[in-house]
Image (cartoon, grey):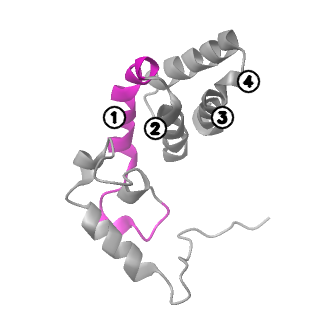
């Protein structure tokens, strides 16, 4: 895993509480994150999720510096093949939370199927089984 997980999400929290964070420090770590993400050529979905959290807190000017790369990452990291959803993967609904979502257009055709999948996988007690197994020590 790279710098983005969880650093990008933490930088997003610093933006949320920016009144408590020295401006120069916040600008420096934000620029570092923007430079980092824009130079990525291998994508990992945990890192993407951290950068998406950061992007929600950024001013438009800074968000615009990374929006194209985030879109590229979303396309590469989200699993839109229903037959793979039983494995540990990033599903469309994990990056698209409403029709107004930034990435809705990428998955509009598959979102209803993904929602159906989630409904069918919910247990009678209201929870979902994980798609991964803890390793042994």
List the single residue furthest toward the top.
24
Q: Tell which tag, 3 or 1, sits nearer the viewer.
A: 3
User: Could you say where residue 24 lies in the image, as x and y percent from the top left?
Assistant: 67, 9
Measured in 3D between alpha carbons, the distance from the residue under mark 1 to the one under mark 4, in whole angstroms, is: 33 Å
Measured in 3D between alpha carbons, the distance from the residue under mark 4 to the one under mark 2, in whole angstroms, is: 32 Å
Instruction: Decide which of tag 3 and tag 4 comes sooner along the chain.
Output: 3
Q: Is residue 79 magenta?
A: yes
Instruction: Decide which of tag 4 and tag 2 comes sooner along the chain.
Output: 4
List the single residue furthest toward the right.
137
User: Could you say where residue 65 lies in the image, as x and y percent from the top left?
Assistant: 40, 19
Residue drawn at (80%, 64%) of the image: 137
Q: Are marks 1 and 4 in contact (CB under 8 Å)?
A: no
Residue tagged 2: 43
Magenta region's main secondary structure? helix
Instruction: Decide which of tag 3 and tag 1 comes sooner along the chain.
Output: 3
Question: Residue 115 versus residue 13: which sits nearer the camera?
Answer: 13
Q: Are marks 1 and 2 in contact (CB under 8 Å)?
A: yes
Assign a secondary structure to mark 1.
helix
Q: Are marks 4 and 2 in contact (CB under 8 Å)?
A: no
- The answer to whether residue 134 is above or below residue 104 is below
Residue 59 as seen in the image, left or right of residue 7: left
Measured in 3D between alpha carbons, the distance from the residue under mark 3 to the one under mark 1, in whole angstroms, is: 22 Å
Residue tagged 4: 20
Residue tagged 3: 10
- The answer to whether residue 11 is above or below residue 65 is below
Assign a secondary structure to mark 2.
loop
Mark 3 neighbour class, 10 Å CA radius: few under 14, some 14 to 19, many 20 or more: some
């Amino acid at each position: 895993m790279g710098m983005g997980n969880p650093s990008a999400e933490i930088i997003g929290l610093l933006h949320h509480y920016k009144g408590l964070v020295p401006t120069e420090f916040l600008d420096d770590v934000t620029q570092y994150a923007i430079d980092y993400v824009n130079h990525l050529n291998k994508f990992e979905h945990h890192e993407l999720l951290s950068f998406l959290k950061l992007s929600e807190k950024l001013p438009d000017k800074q968000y615009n510096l990374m929006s194209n790369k985030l879109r590229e990452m979303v396309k590469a990291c989200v699993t839109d093949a229903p037959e793979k959803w039983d494995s540990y993967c990033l599903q469309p609904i994990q990056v698209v939370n409403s029709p107004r979502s930034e990435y809705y257009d990428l998955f509009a055709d598959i979102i209803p199927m993904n929602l159906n999948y989630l409904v069918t996988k919910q247990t009678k007690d209201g929870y979902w089984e994980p798609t991964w197994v803890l390793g042994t020590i």
